[in-house]
Amino acid sequence: MLAELAVRFILGGLIVSLFSVTGELWKPKTFSGIFGAAPSVALASLALTFAKQGPPVVALLARSMVIGSVALYAYGAACVFATKQESWPVWLAALSSWLAWFAAAAAGLGASAALGARP
Amino acid sequence: MRPKLDPNGLQKTKAWEYLVRFVFGGVITALAGLAAKSWGPVIGGLFLAFPAILPASLTLVSQHDGRRRAIDAARGGRLGSLGLMAFAGVVWMTATRWPPVAVLVAATIAWMAIDGVLWAIRYGRKEQGS
């Protein structure tokens, strides 16, 4: 278990860093910002899940990831709004917008369950 | 305007800032694995689209280039989520049919293509001359 977590930590850290460096190579910021929403955590996690648990589990993860991506849009919208507030430090605006992600993810999961899509 | 390579962007970043991103990315990837193990893939899958790196990135952008650029980067992140939906959709549709490498490569290409096209539509003209 610990070994697997360590592999996830290192692989995830490396892929996130790679996308982050790639993003910094580009301008304008509206384009480089796209790399902040890159599938970095997903690539590491899905590759390991393919190897350990097989394709059906990967498909389930990906289906939920679609909902997570909608929540990421909500995060982005909240973040744009909050970052525009001059009285808020940017770090606080970006971190507090996580609440929008959690709310949208929970709502999406609830809607999915209500529609009978949950396994 | 087209996106341009700007190698100077790397020079602004200090070593500890790369370390912060590495740690953020590593911790979130490990937590996503723990979530999938503890609560199953339905909950775990949500965290594959968690905005792990954006708070650190936006904070560093604001320190290096100011708030206005940080807002632009947040706009980019918002748009990037649409490409991530395409990534997830491709994996969902192909995971049980294609070899793993083909699935991940196709999904990554879908992410890049969707985000590239949407950026060109949304910002390509607007950013002309800026």
Image: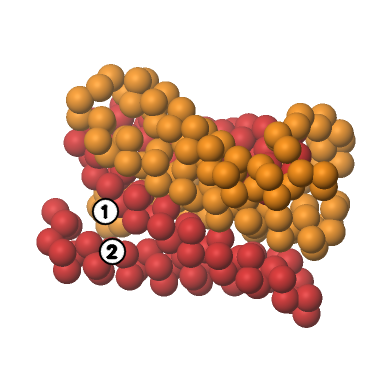
Point out the image quarter for the C terminus of chain A.
Answer: bottom left
Instruction: Check the residue under mark 1 and report the chain it is in.
Output: B
Point out the image quarter for the N terminus of chain A.
Answer: top left
For label 2, the crowd category at 10 Å Cα-Cα, with few meaning under 14, some 14 to 19 and many 20 or more, is many
Tag 2 and tag 1, C-beta contact below 8 Å: yes
Give the numbered dot on residue A109.
2
Judged left or right of residue A39, residue B106 is left
The residue positioned 45% from the left and 44% from the top of the image is B84
Say which amino acid is labelled 1.
Val
Instruction: Check the residue under mark 2 and report the chain it is in.
Output: A
Write down the residue under mark 1.
B42
In the rendered image, what is the letter of the chain coloured red? A
**Which color was chain B given?**
orange
Local secondary structure at mark 2: helix
For label 1, the crowd category at 10 Å Cα-Cα, with few meaning under 14, some 14 to 19 and many 20 or more, is many
From this viewpoint, is residue A40 visible? no
Q: Is residue A64 above or below residue A5?
A: below
Local secondary structure at mark 1: helix
Classify residue A45 by image quadrant.
top left
